[in-house]
Image (cartoon, helix red, strand yellow):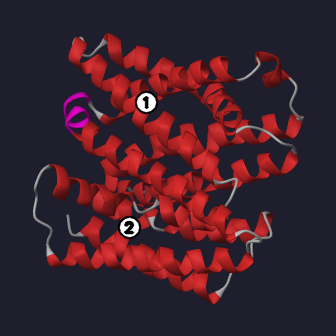
Amino acid sequence: MRFSAERTGIALALLAAVGFSMKAIFVKLAYGIAPVEAITIMTLRMFFSVPVFLVVALRLHRSAPVLSRRDWVMFILLGVIGYYGSSLLDFMGLRYISAALERLILYTYPTLTVLIAWIWFKRPLKPHEWIAIALSYAGIGFAFAHDLDLAAEGGAVWLGGGLVFASSLAYALYLTGGAPMIARLGGARFTALAMTVSALGAFLHFALTESPAALFALHWKIYAFCGLMAVFSTVLPVFMLSAAIQRIGAPRTVLIGSFGPVSTIFFGWLWLDEPISLHQSAGAVLALAGVLLVSLKK
């Protein structure tokens, strides 16, 4: 049976959504093996994944226009803010909150992108966008209530939620700043270069704050989970997402991507023993409704 471009695009979008959603699961599994710093997990993720992005960047660089000094400055800024800063804050926040709550908070970046355009570029918000924002944050409130009920220390949930929200904000800033460059340079080249810059930032951070010996003295399962995260939650979904957008367009890809938080809730229950409550389910429905409303109406 031959798959049409549409069916292939739908399959790729679904696989990308599941892959991205598994990142939180792999991080939580690694944390459960032994005490390990967030920057160590992030460095291992980049160590395993950046060779692929570096090869892609070099290959595309040879057949593309030469980048200006301003382009490189933008890549450094966006790489630091986006993949490096956003990932580090996300990994830190996962110490304190469930994988399901992390994914719901992180998935608010479309509404944050709209708010940034309103504040920074003075673009007026339409009624459906205000409704979308209200739905998203009402949903997060429900999910927060779920985690607060289970937490021994409510302050830890607020700290973790704040870190992940800062991660989502950093990613929204990255998307806002990167949109013109993506349109001009292409998604694959932009992503490969931004990921490479982000990896260099992670390596420098680790070298300045941690002992190099610590990177080689971890339990083998931590390396395994970081390797799986690099392959199935970083490299493959990044390229599958781009391929899906080419085949079925961004709006339908966003729609299918809403399955990601749902799969995180399921895998968190399956592999991390995270309970699923009515509060959490209601929160997921509201948050995803808001994200879809603001994404599909663009």
Which residue is tagged 2? 255
In the picture provided, is 238 more to the left or to the right than 254? right
Q: Point out residue 286 in the picture as x, y percentages from the top left corner.
A: 43, 81
Q: Please say whether residue 226 is visible from this viewpoint.
A: yes
- When asked about the image quadrant of residue 207, the answer is top right
First to last magenta residue range: 180-185
Q: Give me the residue at 55% from left, 45% from top.
A: 89
Q: At x 86% / y 40%, what residue is drawn?
A: 221
- Give residue 154's position: percent from left, percent from top: 67, 70
Vertical comparison of 130 with 56: above or below: below
181 falls in the magenta region: yes
The three-letter amino acid code for the residue at tag 1 is Val
* Percent coordinates x, y for residue 137 in the rendering: 41, 74
Residue 152 higher or lower than 216, as above or below: below
Q: Residue at x 67, y 23 (%)?
A: 209
Q: Amino acid at mark 2?
A: Leu
The crowding category of the residue bearing disc 1, from other C-alpha atoms within 10 Å (few below 14, some 14 to 19, many at least 20), is many
Out of 101 and 193, give the one closest to the viewer. Answer: 101
Return the residue at label 1: 80
| Nearer the camera: disc 1 or disc 2 | 1
